[in-house]
Image: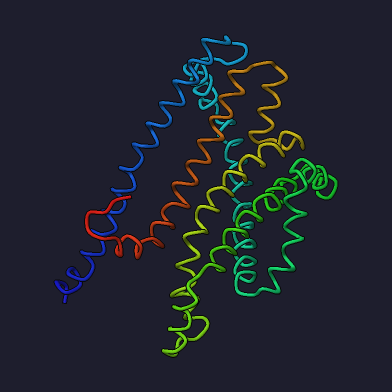
Amino acid sequence: MAKAMVRAILPMFLDRLGRVGQFLWSGWAGLAGLALFAALWQAGHERYGDFILPAPLATLAAGAVIAADPAAWALAGQTTLRAVEGFALAALVGAAGGLAAGYSAATMRLARPILTVLLGVPPIAWIVLAMIWFGSTDGTIITTVLVAATPVVFVGVAEGAVTRDRGLDDMARAFGAGPLARLTTLGLRHVAAFLFPALTVALGSAFKVAVMAELLANTGGIGGALATARANLDVAEALAWVLIAVAGLILVEYVLVHPVRSEFDRWRNAARPWGVKR
């Protein structure tokens, strides 16, 4: 009995371990991109000087000083939590609305003018309105992130649902598959190819909008720290806080979004011919 369980579990464990190793190995390309960005940053520093653009090493030194302060970790966690809460709401609302619009032409026609309004109003206007509605609270940041990120997820999911293979759907219906079975086995697999790129863009928007809302609404977090650095004309500290915000974004993306995407993409990797790589 124990040997049978080991035989059943071991292949699954090795497959998951291999995908984790492949995911970690793919990080070398990201490190190469960051190295190129740092080289361009250094060139800009040498061209414009410390006051306009401090050197990467000087910014990292300022970041190390910030990281040594426990209060700074609280500020970074505050911003990350607000951004993730807004992003999660945007993902749920956008995905549900996108699926409804993708499967219903009437819903799509109703949603288009609403999307135009949401996309046409700049985020700073939503921040002002949210400040009136919620004051200097987390509600201001979360609401602004929700409004800014939802259309991105909605459009991605709707596009995926609209472009699904109707022939496969008809074949599954002919074999007796109900609407829910067709959605989970066919529809969602196709939609996932459009959903996860949209989620990546929405997550980036969530962090950018959260920091901007914190700065304008004076609600603490990384935005509040950036306001302090601006008041002190400390460019190195301001850039260090920007790097901390980007680090939080990368952490959430690679810990939350990409692992889930790898689970959804297992069938796509299995269907790829032997030896064909990304």
- Left or right: where 199 falls relative to 37: right
- Left or right: where 140 falls relative to 277: right
Residue 177 percent location from the top left of the image: 45, 86
Residue drawn 29% across the image and 63% down it: 270
| Nearest the eye: 32 or 14 | 32
Residue 129 percent location from the top left of the image: 83, 47
66 versus 9 height, above or below: above
3 versus 213 height, above or below: below
156 versus 32 height, above or below: below
The quadrant of the rendering that contains the N terminus is bottom left
Residue 241, quarter of picture? top right
For the view shown, which residue lies furthest in the right direction?
A: 132
Residue drawn 49% across the image and 69% down it: 188
Residue 161 percent location from the top left of the image: 55, 68
Residue drawn 32% across the image and 60% down it: 269
Residue drawn 72% across the image and 62% down it: 112
